[in-house]
Amino acid sequence: MKMVGVQRAVLVLLVACCVLLAITQQASAAKHAVGGSQGWDESTNFDSWTSAQTFKVGDQLVFKYSQGLHSVVELSSEAAYKSCDIGKSVNSLSTGNDVVKLDKPGTRYFACGTTGHCGQGMKLKVTTVAGNAPSTPASSSSTPASTSAASPHFPGPASFVPLMILVILCAFSVF
C-alpha cells in the first residue's frame, strides 16, 4: 500500500516538471513589434531598430501596417535583400498584422512588396540566436509572447502532451 503512494507522488512530480518546463519556455519568448511604435513604414529606420534588439529562437516578429499600402515579403538571400529583389521571395504576407515566428537560428530578410518601398529602406535583416537567454528587445517595441508562441526548439504546451502521455504510461508500466 505504501508503495502505491510513492508511485503516485513520483508520477505527479514528473508531470509537474513537464508543465513547469513548458510554462518557463513560453515566458522567455517575446513578440517584437517591427519598427516599434512607428510600425512597418517607410519612415522607420529598421537598421537602428534591429540594432537595439536581440532576437532568439521562439520569438515572433509582428508587422503592423496599412493593409493595401504595404506588405511583407520574406526574401531568399542576402543578395536579394541588398538588391531589393522581391521576385526572390520565400513568403508573402499582406494582412496588415502579420506574425512571423523565429523558429531557428540564422539570418532572415524581409522587405515591403510595394514597388519602390524596399529601395527607400523598408527592409529588415533579422539575426536569430539560439539559447536560453531572454530576448532583449527595446522596451517600447515588444511584449511578452502569448501562450501560442511555442517553438520547435523550445516546446510549448502542445508539444508536451505526447511527452506527458509517455511519462504517464512509463510510470504505470514500471510500477
Image (cartoon, grey):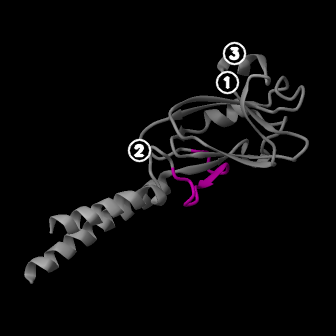
Give the image quarter of residue 74: top right
Residue 6 disc label: none
Q: Give the Cα separation between the discs numbered 2 and 1.
A: 27 Å
Q: Secondary structure at mark 1?
A: loop
Of labels 2 and 1, earlier in sequence is 1
For image coordinates 44% across by 54% down, the residue present is 25
Q: Give the Cα separation between the discs numbered 3 and 1.
A: 8 Å
Q: Position of residue 164 (x, y in %)?
A: 35, 62
Q: Is residue 79 left or right of residue 95?
A: left
Looking at the rendered structure, the number of numbered marks drawn on it comes to 3
Foreground tag (3 vs 2): 3
Identify residue type, mark 3: Ala
* Residue where numbered disc 3 is placed: 79
Identify residue type, mark 2: Asn
**Vertical arrangement, residue 62 with respect to residue 157, above or below:** above
Query: Is 149 inside the magenta-drawn segment?
Result: yes
* Residue where numbered disc 2 is placed: 132
Image quarter where the C terminus lies is bottom left
For image coordinates 81% across by 48% down, the residue present is 96
**Vertical arrangement, residue 62 with respect to residue 165, above or below:** above
Residue 76 disc label: 1
Image quarter where the N terminus lies is bottom left
Give the image quarter of residue 51: top right
Residue furthest bottom as drawn: 1
Q: Position of residue 156 (x, y in %)?
A: 47, 56
Q: Give the Cα separation between the discs numbered 3 and 2.
A: 31 Å
| Region of the chain picked out in magenta, as a range | 137-150
Q: Secondary structure at mark 3?
A: helix
Q: Is residue 12 left or right of residue 131?
A: left
Residue furthest front as drawn: 173
